[in-house]
Amino acid sequence: MVVEAKGQIWLFSFGTKSAKPKKGKHVASVGPLQLTSDKLPPAKSYEIVAYLAVMPPNEYTRVHTHLGPEAWYSVWRLRREP
């Protein structure tokens, strides 16, 4: 999945942990994600929804639930003050 966010292009790929992109800079590997069972339920297809959330320091989200699994990967970038 290719995403443009905040002036940058991101490539999200799904596969084995050792898989690396053929081009570009590898930033991070996430996973394996722990599911409540040892495998996903059978389905013709699966869907992933990705969001970009920019949260100022000391912000938080309300407690909420989803029908399926949810995972967060945080990218921290420290900004120098001028």
Image (tube, grey):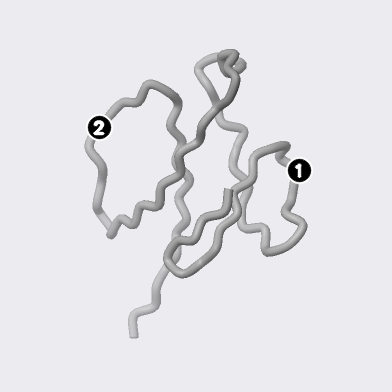
For the point 39% across and 78% down, the residue is 80
Position of residue 1 in the picture relative to residue 25 (left or right)? left
Figure check: 69 above or below 39: below
**Badge 1 or badge 2: first in the primary sequence:** 1
Viewport quadrant of the C terminus: bottom left
- Would you call the spot at circle 1 few (<14 residues within 10 Å), some (14-19), or many (20 or more)? few
Residue that label 1 marks: 18
Q: Which sits in the foreground, 33 or 2?
A: 2
Specify the farthest residue to the front: 44
Q: Is residue 4 above or below residue 81?
A: above
Q: Position of residue 73 (x, y in %)?
A: 48, 45
Q: Amino acid at mark 1?
A: Ser
Image quadrant where residue 9 sits: bottom right
- Residue at the (45%, 65%) spot, across then down: 77
56 vs 24, left or right, is left
Q: Position of residue 79 (x, y in %)?
A: 39, 73
Considering only vertical position in the picture, is 49 above or below 51?
above
Residue carrying label 2: 63
* Residue type highlighted by circle 2: Val
* Residue at point 64%, 40% (across, down): 14
**Mark 1 falls on what kind of element?**
loop
For the residue labelled by badge 2, is the local secondary structure a helix, a strand or a loop?
Answer: loop
